[in-house]
Image: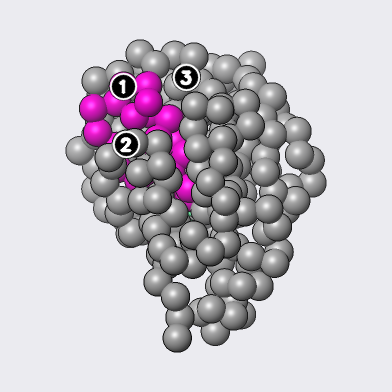
Amino acid sequence: MAASPRAFVLRHTRLRPVLGLEQIRLHLADDALSLWRAVQLETGDPDAPIPYWAFAWGGGLAIAHYLRDRPATVAGRRVLDLASGSGLCAIAALQAGASDAIAVDIDVRAVAAIGLNARANGRRLTMLRRDVLDDEPPDVDVILAGDCWYEARLAARVLPWLRRAREAGIEVLVGDPGRAHLPVAELVELATYDVRTTTELEDLAHRRGRVYSLLPPGTGGAVS
Ligand SMILES: C[S@@+](CC[C@H](N)C(=O)[O-])C[C@H]1O[C@@H](n2cnc3c(N)ncnc32)[C@H](O)[C@@H]1O
């Protein structure tokens, strides 16, 4: 019988501090490929998604650094962490003083990992397993989008949704380690960090993680 998503996450990860962000502890795995195989076996689905939730990705790490350095960005504000994975950005936002955080992901094991990680860091958040990208803008002040531009199909859906949110007056912070599909022309760079991703699925363990703000519609612009 298949394990519950929570039991699966616990069985395949180890709770440990995030490198460079030791105030955050996450349930992380060591070997992405063997964990991916375990997910495929568990679900009986050869097309099961990569277990993104078991790693801290470059984009989310950059946002987490930024919020540690500039807590006023989210302090007292309601935050939505889009494509949350492990919950890293939502947890960083709550540590920085966000009043509420909603962590959204489509993967059932991500939602389980987010719950476990929030608890491990003594934080409460709302977990939402849902594809929100066709929804109206959410009722929040800030959206954090960490590492959402790693594949073309998702990239093509994320940007219009974030644009609508920006139009509705929501601040949008993007974190990215140099993915091909990043819409740089619509972003203003705010900060850069050396980040260490925790998965061998990346070609480089050390990357430059950048944090950007999405420009309000109609303002055009370029990145530095
Ligand atoms: C590369 S991971 C980034 C995780 C985290 N933000 C970070 O930077 O560590 C991308 C995440 O996007 C999620 N995802 C993919 N499509 C999605 C969608 N339509 N809505 C919400 N999450 C989605 C995946 O399940 C995965 O957890």
Q: Colour scheme of this structure image? A: one colour
**Residue span colored magenta:** 84-107
Left or right of 56, for residue 214? left
The spot of residue 57 in percent (x, y) is 60, 42
Identity of the residue drawn at 62% across and 26% down = 20
Q: CA distance from mark 3 to mark 2?
A: 16 Å
Residue 97 is labelled as 1
Q: Mark 3–mark 2 contact, CB under 8 Å?
A: no
Look at label 2 and name its amino acid. Arg
Query: Where does residue 148 sit, x and y in percent of width and height?
Result: 53, 45
Residue at image position (57%, 17%) is 191
The residue to which callout 3 is attached is 68
Q: Is residue 39 above or below residue 32?
A: below
The Cα–Cα distance between marks 1 and 3, rounded to whole angstroms, is 10 Å
Provide the secondary structure element on which disc 3 rests.
Answer: helix
Q: Nearer the viewer, mark 3 or mark 2?
A: 2
Residue type at mark 3 is Arg
Q: Earlier in the sequence, mark 2 or mark 1?
A: 1
- Circles 2 and 1, Cβ within 8 Å, touching? The answer is no
> Local crowd at mark 3 within 10 Å, few (<14), some, or many (≥20)?
some
Could you tell which of marks 3 and 2 lies nearer the N-terminus? 3
| Residue 123 tag number | 2
Outermost right residue: 203
Q: Does residue 202 appear in this view?
A: yes
Q: Kindly state the secondary structure of the residue where label 2 is placed.
A: loop
